Structure formats: structure tokens, C-alpha cells
Image (cartoon, rainbow, N blue to C red):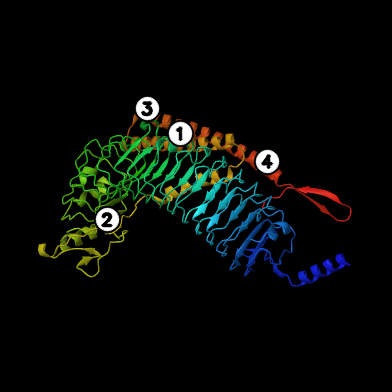
Amino acid sequence: MFLLRSILLGFIGRSFAIIYDCNNFLNGVYNIRYCALSNVTVTHDAEEVVFRSEYPRPYYFEFSDSKLTEIPRIMFTSFPEMQNLDVTRSQVENINKYTFEQAKELRYLNISGNRLSVLNNFVFKGCDKLVRLDVSNNRLSEVKEKALHDLPKIDHLDLSGNLLEQLDEGLFSKLTLLSYLSLANNRISEIHDRMLENCTLIAFLDLRGNRIHRLSDTFLSSLTYLRVLVLDDNRLTSLVIPQQLTKLLASKNNISSIYAEDSTKSQLYLMTLSRNNLNDIRNITVLETLSILDLSFNPIGPLHLTSFLKLKKLNDLNLEATQLKTIEHGIFTQQSKLRRLDLSYNMLQKLDISVLTSTPNLETLFIDGNGLLDFNYEHIPELFPNLTYLGLFANSWNCSYLTSLVRFCNRNKITIGTSKNYGEITHLTNVQGIYCASSNKDRIQFQPSLAISHLDENFSQEEDTQLKLIVANVTSTEFEYKLMVELLDMIRNVNASNADRLDEVQKMVLRGGRGCDASHAVGFQVFIMLILSMILVLNVGFLLYVQYNANARRAVDRMIIFKRGETASIQTQMEDF
């Protein structure tokens, strides 16, 4: 009798369950592995909720326009093969200790943009295969010491955009495969020296937008495979650059002292130090691998003739608002590869354009905001045949002179439109939006309101994409990870070497060299480039072979055994979502 009553009550309760059906269309295409759930309301995990799918084994689940006070555990019992779960902006306020107990196949979890305030110990218990976790833009003020200890395979972790003030020293101690970590835009003031000592595979570390005042040498040097370090908008006063870094972004700090751990072994090719307190750049200009350098809005003052002597690979240099009064002949004598140069908002009341003779590949030149009256622009086509942009705003041009200058630029297809937020002037006398004065008494001085980056954004994004693809896909062994990072460095070096040799060939052609010696020299350079390219192809092939093996192992991990029909036949299949 008791059993009958229980079954009856269970049936009655089930009849009142809220049912949500999957939408299997992804970008207008029917996908049996995809399940979209919209307008779902779950105010408590104990509520009777049923999720149904036309196809019984979807992998990827996405919630939209939903209110999930908690993530329903029934999701993982109903769909034990779930690999991806996206509950972005679903008003999640809490995660219970046993929420993910049955999430045995979960690889990717996105709970960003919710209302979480704390991550308790062992909250992700059951997520043994989780690779990527995004908890960004919540209200987290605390992450317990053992909150992440059940994530042995985690590779990508995003805790940015929260209210974290301090992190336990052992928080990341179990994340030995972690390669991407973002703690950006929190309130962190201190990073423990040993906080990441077990995370030796980290390649990308984002600490921007915090209150960090110190990073120890020990902390950075222990991260052997760190390639990208983002420290913008902190309170650092000094910094040691580890030799393994390739990109350093440390703008908007109070840095007055910076030097390389070992300048002879440095791999750094991009560094942004805008809006700091640098007045001595000698420790920076010894980094011969630099290709992109931003020193804008620092009180650097006069440049020595040998300031950039070793930076032969520079192609983007930003010296905006660095208190320069003159540019002497010989300062840029080694910058033949320079493509972008920003000299805006300094004190260059006179500018002899011939001081840039050694930069024939210049494409973009900013001389805005210097109080210039004139300069010898007629030599531009001869000196800079590739120049496509010239910044002329906020100087002291006479209107008649400026009209002639603008006509010259138009004839030579040189763009002069503003690319800065304090650019065009329409309420004062101007020529094509560039301020000019009809007389000396009408002249006014301008000051920049914001630093504007003029880096090659496409170049930076391309490098970031390559790195993140490797970081996202490498989750198998430490050996494979190290191999891939080293191959990425090799690819970059071979590309740089080929670019150098191509420049040599172009110079030989431009010099008009004749005879056997010149022909042999050109042929030799081309032959070396072909050899390097072949080596590169072989290494990339080996990289793909290693990655193929890793993917094959992951596919085996995803083999699903299921029972069909009354005959209890067992079938296996490998399917990637």
C-alpha cells in the first residue's frame, strides 16, 4: 500500500513538472548536438523541472533569456554526455556543492555575467574533464582555497571582472595544466610569490585593472612558458622583464624603473609602457628583439643619439607626449624597418624631415600638437615613398601655408584625416578640419586628452589568436605543450629571418647591382629563404602530427557506450561535437 501511494504521488508530482524542450537550430542550421533553451525559470534546484531533446544525446547546451537562481542538477542526469554548458547572463546566484556531481563529460563551462558572490570549496566536484571555465563578470568577492581543486585538466580559466581583493596562496596549486589565466579588472593588491608555482605551463597571464604594486622576480621567472603578460592599469613602480616573454603590456602604472632579467636572451617583441613615470629608457633600448614599442606619455625628455641604436627590428614606435624638444640627425639611423612613428604632442617647434632619412619604409607619421609653423614637406615623396598617413592636427600652421600642405598631401595620396579623439576642429578656422591661424595673435595651443595607441592592431591580434589556439587545444601532456610553444617560437624566428633576407634582396635590386657577384648574392639569399621555409614546413607538419595524436586520444576519451533495443547490444562510436 505504501509503495502504491509513493508511485501515485510521484506520478501526480511529475504531471505538474515544468517541461522545457530543446531548440536544435544553431545559426539557422539544424544540429542534433546542439540544444538551445530559452525563457527558462528555475528559482530553486529542488523544483521539478524536465529538459527534453528530440535527439537523446546533445553535447552543447546554451541558455538565453533565462532566470536560473541555481544551475539545475537534473541537466547532468538527463544528459550525462553533456560537454558544453553556457549559462551566460542567466541570473545565477549560487552553485551548490553537488551541482556538478554527475557532470562527468563536461569540457566547457561558461557562467559569466551572472550574480555569483562566492565559490565554495569543492564546488566543481565531478568536473574531472573540464578544460575551460569562464566565471568572468560576476560579483565574486571570495574564492575559497579548495574551490578549484577538482579541476585537474583545466586549461583556460577566466575570473576577470569580479570583486576579488585577495587570493589564497594555494588556490591554483592543483591546476598543473593551466595555460591561460585572467584575473583582470578585480581589486587585487598582492600576488603571492608562490601562488602559481605549480602552474608552470601558463602562457597567457592577464592582471590588468587591479591594484597590484609589486610583482617579485621569483614569481615571474618561475613561469617558464609565459609568453604574454598584461599588467595595464595597476600601481607598479618597478618591473623586471623575464626572458621568456614575447609581449608585455604595462601601461597606466607608476613605473620608473624597468630592466630585463637577461637582455641577451630576451624574446620580447612587443612592449607598451604608456602613461608611466619613465625618464630613463636605457634598460629598454637594449632589447634588440623589440618590434613594437610604446613609450608615450612618459617624461623621457631629450633623446641621446644612441638611444635606439640596437633596436634594428622596430617597425612601430610611439613617442607621443614624451617632452621631446628636438630630433637630431642620427637618432633613427638603424630604424630602416620603421613603419609607424608617433612624435605628436611634444615640443618640436621645428622639424627637419631629413632627420628621418634612415626610415624609408615609413607609412604613418604623427607630428600633431607640436606648435609647428612649417617643415620641409616637399621632400616626403623622395624620402618616404610608402607614406600613406600624415598627422598634422593641433599645430600653429598659417592658413595659407596649411592649404598648400594639404594640396600637396592630396596630390601624393597621403591621408591627413584625424585618427585621434582630439583631432578635427570645426568651430575654429581650419583647412579640412585641421586648425590654422590667420595671424600670430590667433594661434592657440592644444593639449591631448587621452593617449591613443597607434600599434598595429591586426598584427597583435593575429599573434594572440595563434597563441590562444595553441593554449585552448593543448590539454593532453606537458611534453606536447612545451613542444608546441617551442615550435611557435621557431615559426616566429623563421618568419623574422625570412623578412630580413627579403629586405636584403629588395635593397640589392634597388641599388641596381649588376654582374655575377650581385646575381650570386641575390640567388644565395633566395636559396637560404627556401631552406628556412622547408624547415618551417617540416616543423609545422610535426606539430600537426603531434596535435593529431592528441586529438585522437581525446576522441577515444569521448567514446560513448550505450545500449540500444531489447537485445542489449553494445555499440561504440566516436563523435566530436
Q: Which residue is drawn at 17% across and 54% down?
A: 372
User: 241 or 145, which lies in front?
Assistant: 145
Q: Name the residue under label 2.
A: 391
Distance CA(mark 3)–CA(mark 4): 56 Å
User: 537 or 383, which lies in front?
Assistant: 537
Residue 407 vs 365, above or below: the answer is: below
For residue 553, the mark is 4
Distance CA(mark 1)–CA(mark 2): 37 Å
Q: What element carries label 2?
A: strand
Distance CA(mark 4)–CA(mark 1): 36 Å
Distance CA(mark 4)–CA(mark 2): 55 Å
Whether residue 124 is visible here, answered yes or no, is: yes
Q: Mark 3 points at which residue?
A: 516
Distance CA(mark 3)–CA(mark 2): 45 Å
Give the residue type that dot 1 points to.
Met
Q: Is mark 4 on a helix, strand or loop?
A: helix
Residues marked 4 and 2 touching at CB (< 8 Å)? no
Give the residue type that dot 4 points to.
Arg
Give the residue type that dot 3 points to.
Cys
Residues marked 1 and 2 touching at CB (< 8 Å)? no
Which of labels 1 and 2 is toward the front? Answer: 2
